[in-house]
Each structure stands twice: as C-alpha cells, then as structure tokens.
Image (cartoon, grey):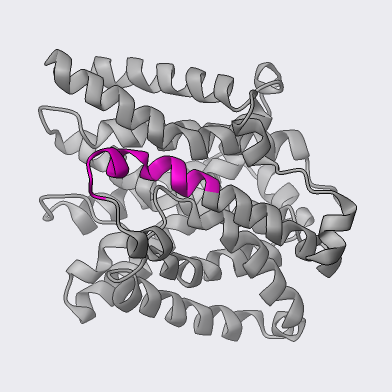
C-alpha cells in the first residue's frame, strides 16, 4: 500500500484556495479580455471539483463514527460562514430568510456536503463493485442537478458534484503514485489536448461557461458541454496532480486552505466596495495585488477567534453523545 502524501495534498488545497481568490478578482477585471476569460473558464472548470476530489481521496478509510462526529461541526461551520457572508445583504436591506437557508453563499455548501457524501458512500458500499455503471448513473444525476436544480437552489450542488466525490473514493494511492511517476510528455500531451478542446469548444461563446451555468443552454447543447466539462476536468486534474509538488515553504500556511476558501468572500466584498469608492479601476495588476492582500488577510484571520473556532469547532465528548 502506498500512503497518501498528506503534505502534498495540503499544499495543493492551499494553492487551489488561492486560485479561487484570483478567479474572484479576474472575472471583474476591466477591460475584458478573451485571454482572461479563458483563464477564468479553466479555473472555474477544475477548482471546486478538485476540492471535492481531494476531500474524497483523503477520507477513503473514514469510519461511520468519525462521519457522525463531523456532522455537527460541519453544520456550525456552514451556518457561521453563511451568516458572515450574508452581512453585506443585511446592511443593504436585502436579507431574505428563505435565501439564507436555500441559497448557500460562496461555496459554504461544500462544508456540509462532505459528511453527507461520506455517509452515503459508506451506507452504499456495494456500489464500489460496479464503478463504471455507478459513475455513469451518478453523472446523469449530477447533470440533472446542475441543469434543473441549480437555478432554484445552490444546495443542489451537493448532488451535482457527487460524481466527482465518488471518483475520488475510487482512485487508489497506487494509481496516483504511478501517474506521478509517469514520463513528463504524458501530462504535457493531456494539457495540450485539454487547452485545444477548451479553445475550440468555447471560443464562440461571449462569456465563459461553467458547470454552474449549463442551465442557460438548450438541453442537448448542455449535455454535450457537460460531457466536455467532465473530460476537461479529468485532463486538467491529472495535469495538476502530476505538476504540483510539495513545497516546503508552504508547510506552515498550507493547513489554512479552508480558511482562505471560506473567509475570502467577505474580504473580497470589503475590498471591492473600498475600490469602488476610491474610483480605482480593477486592472490586472490591481487584481493580482488585491489577490495577494486577500490571501494574507484570510490566512491571518484563520488563526484568530472566532474564525479559527468556526473552521474547526470544538465540541465536547458529552455533546457528541447527546447529539
């Protein structure tokens, strides 16, 4: 058995969190650019699915008892950051209690989704005996959630991204090790095919598409692009896993990946509001600078109360037993 190299995956999650922040600003850069649109499209294609994949891959051996103990902390974390991210709407007088419960903001759905995915996977362990058929079925259900459910509630993301979670639970440590030992021309070839497919597949669209905007398309076209997205995700994901290595200098901050992921939205809102009042244009250099500032602030906040507690709520043994 080849053990999963935890520092590598922590580093990868931290880099992915930083890229989410970068994407947040790049999509708002003026003037618009086809190159930037392509970068944003690429980031939107693999960032969240890679988080889902890593969460599944690193918890393949988790027990039902551990899953049950993770539910209450996940609810606390999800609710806490949902409330924090709702503050701008409250200030603007646009708060809706219904939307608070059915429209998770800025990816907080992912926190509650992980224990749900883990529990479902454990309860239906027999699905592992038919991985190809099961993956096809889950992919169909995932498309239905993206196309028909997501326009009504972001909670359908929990269903929509489950195929990626299932895939992460099926990939073995040995398979990852073999892939990362493969000749370098293989990931380069995959990258070239992925970029060419993305370019020729989406060049005629004025704005970048993503999994989450498939419902804007006609049904038949949405199915084609869903399959293309899944293929691109596989190719880009393999390139990322191959190319990103463990960086020792990130060891101290890599565990703050979740903090950057959850804290950055409210920081970005504050930064963009200040930018609007200062009448400074959000050019590419400004976007890169603000990305760095946001990451540094998010890492700092993730180390202090109440954010550090919300990211990893501590609940006593007695509370677990009574829950």
Q: Which residue is at 89% across, 53% downward? A: 317
Residue 156 can be seen, yes or no: yes
Front residue of this view, candidates 164 and 198: 164
Q: Is residue 148 left or right of residue 184?
A: left
Q: Looking at the picture, how far across and down is residue 172, in whole percent? A: 75, 60
Q: Is residue 109 left or right of residue 178?
A: left
Front residue of this view, candidates 221 and 154: 154
Q: Which residue is at 72% across, 79% downward? A: 128
Q: Is residue 196 left or right of residue 11?
A: left
Q: Looking at the picture, how far across and down is residue 130, in whole percent? A: 68, 85
Q: Is residue 197 above or below residue 269?
A: below
Specify the quadrant of the image occupied by residue 40: top left
**Residue range of the region highlighted in magenta in the rendering:** 80-94
Q: Looking at the picture, how far across and down is residue 41, in whole percent? A: 29, 47
Q: Which residue is at 65% across, 21% downward? A: 250
Q: Is residue 288 above or below residue 155?
A: above
Quadrant into which the C terminus falls: bottom right
Name the chief secondary structure element in magenta. Answer: helix
Q: Looking at the picture, how far across and down is residue 53, in whole percent? A: 59, 56
Quadrant into which the N terminus falls: bottom right
Q: How many marks?
A: 0
Q: Is residue 306 above or below residue 90?
A: above
Residue 245 can be seen, yes or no: no
Specify the quadrant of the image occupied by residue 222: bottom left
Front residue of this view, candidates 96 and 24: 96
Q: Is residue 135 above or below residue 12?
A: below
Q: Which residue is at 64% across, 27% downward? A: 305
Q: Does the segment drawn in magenta span residue 88?
A: yes
Q: Does the segment drawn in magenta span residue 227?
A: no
């Amino acid at each position: 058995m080849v053990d999963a190299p935890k520092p590598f995956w922590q580093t990868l999650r931290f880099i992915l969190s930083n890229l989410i922040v970068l994407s947040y600003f790049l999509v708002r850069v003026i003037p618009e650019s086809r190159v930037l649109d392509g970068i944003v499209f690429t980031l939107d294609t693999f960032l969240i699915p890679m988080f889902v994949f890593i969460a599944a891959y690193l918890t393949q051996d988790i027990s039902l008892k551990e899953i049950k103990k993770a539910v209450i902390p996940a609810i606390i974390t999800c609710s806490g950051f949902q409330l924090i991210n709702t503050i701008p709407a409250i200030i603007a007088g646009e708060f809706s209690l219904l939307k608070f419960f059915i429209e998770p903001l800025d990816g907080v759905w992912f926190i509650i989704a992980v224990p749900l995915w883990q529990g479902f996977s454990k309860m239906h362990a027999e699905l592992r005996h038919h991985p190809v058929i099961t993956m096809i079925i889950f992919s169909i259900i995932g498309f239905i959630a993206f196309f028909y459910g997501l326009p009504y509630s972001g909670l359908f993301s929990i269903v929509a991204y489950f195929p990626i979670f299932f895939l992460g639970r099926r990939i073995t440590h040995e398979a990852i090790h073999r892939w990362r030992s493969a000749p370098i021309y293989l990931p380069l070839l995959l990258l070239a095919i992925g970029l060419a497919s993305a370019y020729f597949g989406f060049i005629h669209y004025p704005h970048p598409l993503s999994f989450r905007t498939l419902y804007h398309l006609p049904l038949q076209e949405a199915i084609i692009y869903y399959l293309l997205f899944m293929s691109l995700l596989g190719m880009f994901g393999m390139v990322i896993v191959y190319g990103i290595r463990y960086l020792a200098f990130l060891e101290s901050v890599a565990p703050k990946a979740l903090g950057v992921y959850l804290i950055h939205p409210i920081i970005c809102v504050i930064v963009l509001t200040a930018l609007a009042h200062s009448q400074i244009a959000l050019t590419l250099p400004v976007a890169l600078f603000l990305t760095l500032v946001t990451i540094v602030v998010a890492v700092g906040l993730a180390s202090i109360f109440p954010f550090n507690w919300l990211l990893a709520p501590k609940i006593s043994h007695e509370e677990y037993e009574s829950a």
